[in-house]
Image: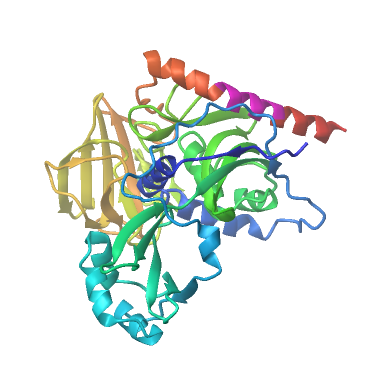
Amino acid sequence: MSVERTLTATTHHLRRLHSHITRQRAALFAVTLVVVGLALGGLEKPAAAVQPAYHTVTDLMLPARVPSAPGADAPQPVSQEALSERLERVEVRPGQSLDAIFREQGFSVGLLQQILALNDETRALKRIRPGEQFAFQRHPDGSLSRMRYALGEDRYLWVDNFGDTPVAYTEARELSSQMFETEGTIQSSLFLAGKRSGLSDAMVMKLANIFGWDIDFVLDIRSGDRFYLLYEKIYRDGEYLRDGEILAATFVNQGERYQAVRYEADNGPQYYAPDGRHMRKAFLRAPLNFSYISSNFNPKRFHPILRRVKAHNGIDYRAPKGTPVYAAGDGHVTRSTYDKYNGHHVFIQHANSIVTKYLHFSRRAVNRGERVRQGQVIGYVGATGLAEAPHLHYEFLVNGQHRNPRTVPLPEVRPLEGQYLVEFQHHAAPYLNQLGRLEAASLYAARE
Ligand SMILES: [Zn+2]
């Protein structure tokens, strides 16, 4: 049952994927997960006889992707296969310029000057980096006839030198993606379960980023939690290049099922629950990657030094000094200052009469009156003011009342509506069906 279904993705599509990857706050849950991996890693049993659970998807009918128009600036190049035998590849060594490479190859330096003057893309060849690849083709007399250089992962820059003057143009490299499905059950850590399922650490991170708004991957993960996912691998010229995006996933945490499907509405690709709600919340649950919680929210805490009840109105997150702290949501800074109790501290006013407070920074990164976006760094963990060790004291207030930041219901981002919701549900249905079949098959197999 493994007829591979190849989804030919256009360069346009991949550029969008790419820009999304750069935008993702991929680092946000990174430290958190590494900590879990380290803490639990020793408990993992060796996975000797376990077969990787991934295989290619066979029977999923997905909406066709619209191919982008071929680049107007690309004349039909000579077929790549025909050329590849005669192309000499040269890798840039540390400190080497294209000028040095030309001299080494016996090419004319005057020709190089002509090439560099052709356009912005050829001018950029003045700043090449070690490890980059050139390929050259020669005339019978040994002089340069064609040169190829990779512009990013999806385009070649070609220079043809057949006549009086060289000609430069770009050529899209054929990128395609193939969808894979996989599943895993957590025994001790998400990373180890991911590894057994054939997932890279980067893919596990993506999975955690999608569900990190609902599931605390430090505190909430239990042995027996399961995941199912459909994801892409990207191929270039038929060879595996890198992992792509997660297209849809199910995560079952302590018996509760969460599902997400990737979809692009009006604001770049995002992940949505089957009913059109954003997976992302308007607030981060914890505004940093912490090591552990040293003091919980407790309105009736008995203070060991003062020997009386003194409320702890926030959560103390332990983390190394200098750990970045993020704005939990969009808002503006109402206070950014120092005093001997709170140390360096920042308050942020958000919509819906919500205020968040961050104390004991080693250093503040925003000023009073500044607008901040969710995930923006506002300061760094420290132990200034009344603090014995580096930690973040974090408070969450609604209408002036302190609430437990770990349990307070977080406001949702506005869900998909109208035509977007209709289109999303049309897009999501085959993915959700596939996830359902995957889960049913695995539960059936487990019962055998
Ligand atoms: Zn505290």
What residue occupies the far right of the structure in this picture? Answer: 448
Q: Which quarter of the picture shows residue 110?
A: bottom left
Q: Which quarter of the picture shows residue 163?
A: bottom left
Quadrant placement of the N terminus:
top right
| Up/down of 128 relative to 361, above or below | below
Q: Residue at x 76, y 34 (%)?
A: 442
Q: Which quarter of the picture shows residue 14?
A: top left
Q: Is residue 394 left or right of residue 369?
A: right
Position of residue 93 measured from the top left corner of the image (x, y, whole percent): 41, 80
Magenta portion: prevailing SS class? helix
Q: Is residue 434 magenta?
A: yes
Seen from the viewer's position, the closer of residues 132 and 106 is 106
Residue 222 shows in the view: yes
What residue occupies the far left of the structure in this picture? Answer: 369
Quadrant placement of the C terminus:
top right
Seen from the viewer's position, the closer of residues 141 and 303 is 141
Q: Residue at x 31, y 49 (%)?
A: 73
Residue 291 shows in the view: no
Q: Is residue 374 left or right of residue 51?
A: left
Seen from the viewer's position, the closer of residues 11 and 78 is 78
Q: Is residue 267 magenta?
A: no
Seen from the viewer's position, the closer of residues 356 and 301 is 356
| Up/down of 314 relative to 133, above or below | above
Q: Is residue 332 left or right of residue 131?
A: left
Position of residue 397 measured from the top left corner of the image (x, y, whole percent): 29, 31
**Magenta segment:** 429-437
